[in-house]
Image (tube, rainbow, N blue to C red):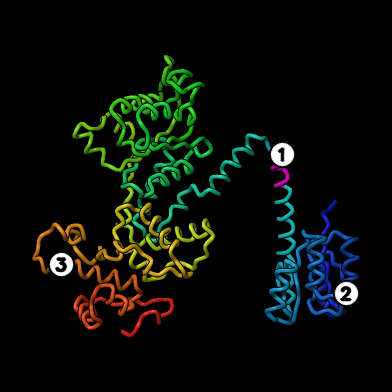
Amino acid sequence: MANSLPTILLVDDEEHSLAAMRMALEDEFDILTALNAGDARELMEEHFVQVIFCDHRMPGTTGVEFLTEVRERWPETVRIIITGYTETGDMISAINDAGIYQFLTKPWHPDHLMMVAKNATDLFRLTRDYDRMSLEMRYLSRSVEAKLEEQRKALREGMGFETVLRAANSPLNAVIEQARQFATFDVPVMITGETGTGKRNLARAMHYSSLRSDKPYFEVDCASVDDDILEIELFGARRGALSGITSHKTGLFQKADRGTLYLSGVCSLSPRLQLLLLRAARDGAFRPVGSHEMRHAQVRLLTGTERDLRIEVAEGQFNAELYFALSKAGLTVPPLRERQGDLPVLAQTFLFEMAEQHGKPVSGLSDDALQFLSEYDWPGNMRELENEVLRMLIFSQDALLGPELISRHILQAIPTRDVEPETAVDRVLIGTGTLKDRVEQIEMRILRETLTRLKWNKSRAAAELGLSRVGLRAKIERYGLVERKRHDDATTSEEK
């Protein structure tokens, strides 16, 4: 038996319009017609209608009102409205209230009408197929469903490389491309970079982009715990092995079997723990504390270090065999001072996340605030930036956060791209040069910070610094200090 044609319902209070639409569509579809919403409602109850073309301007019940009812009673039916009017209010109402798939304006062309009808019936078919497959998925085995849920959870929590915050032309892009390649090879990777540069996020992204993505992932900071506790944390312990251990303790190597274990601060491991880790990294073998039985686990090791371990290996401070066992591949994460283009993206993202967390609405950081933040070298990297943005949020009074909220030591810093490294503040005090030159460098930074913090209110700045307004103006001109363009009320400054 041949498949029946899709059924389309045409609703219009003008008979000639119904006749014209029927003539254009009847070769490809089963056509039903109605002159008003009441007749159309009866046809919907009697027939299996896939698509409705409904005129908007009809006496009594309008097209939007009728299609809103259709959406509630027959949500699968694809709804298309025909109108000779283009009022914005009508369009918004139709989209919001009736869930309109498409508008068709009068006068319509027969070929266009046919194309819209075919696309609508295809959408109806695909939607039903999707619903059918979704229903079938519910009956999959629990193990498959658990794996799918784990993958969905990873995506929801933002574990992939696409969630590593950076600008389009970031120097981090090259590192991430390397990490993508390493992720697909089941080898240990050592990630080197200063504290707070995002090594942990990179390791997590590598796991969730690897063939082990559906297996366990654990991480531990080797620098934050004592040797005895770290050994138990990594390898486990038998009951009674140490005081306080009243039951068997499962270590991370056993928990992460067939998965991934990230060890940060590996450079701080003691020589004894280096030897224990070497055996686990090389042979997959470990012995829980207090046990005489050797156990095995198949774990991929990712490690993070703040120091260049090649130097420490050369100086005999780190086990050479362990270094080579952990660094089959290596990545170096650049510090934030080398990623100035990334700073606006990071700062704004941190701000919005913290604002949502603390329930304080904001619209963002002003351009001049971002400029000041970008000129600082951030020795604490992203952790320091997060703390600074949180501080600005706490003290903010306006939705747009300006530079006056920035910490004084950041405002006093000379733009890193404008000066040589040896002119940093801490080096000025112990550096070379005449007393006059060194004092002027410090004076310029104090002036810059004070004016910014006080929103360039020169009277307040002069009073705070113990200067006359004439003296302050002379120093501003001498050092070439210029107020940056603000995006909020420019009247906050007094007479220039």
Mark 1 residue type: Tyr
Q: Magenta stretch: dominant SS?
A: helix
**Is residue 189 among the parts visible in the rendering?**
no
Mark 2 residue type: Asn
**Residue carrying label 2:** 36
Mark 1 touching mark 2, by CB under 8 A?
A: no
Could you say which is closer to the camera, residue 316 or residue 28? 316
**Is residue 461 among the parts visible in the rendering?**
yes
Residue at 48% from the left image edge and 48% from the top image edge: 160
Labels 3, 2: front one = 3
On residue 439, which mark appears?
3
**Residue carrying label 1:** 139
Q: Residues within 10 Å of mark 2 (few under 14, many from 20)?
A: many
Mark 3 touching mark 1, by CB under 8 A?
A: no
Q: Secondary structure at mark 3?
A: helix
Q: Secondary structure at mark 2?
A: loop
When the figure is inspected, residue 21 is found, relative to residue 284, above or below; the finding is below
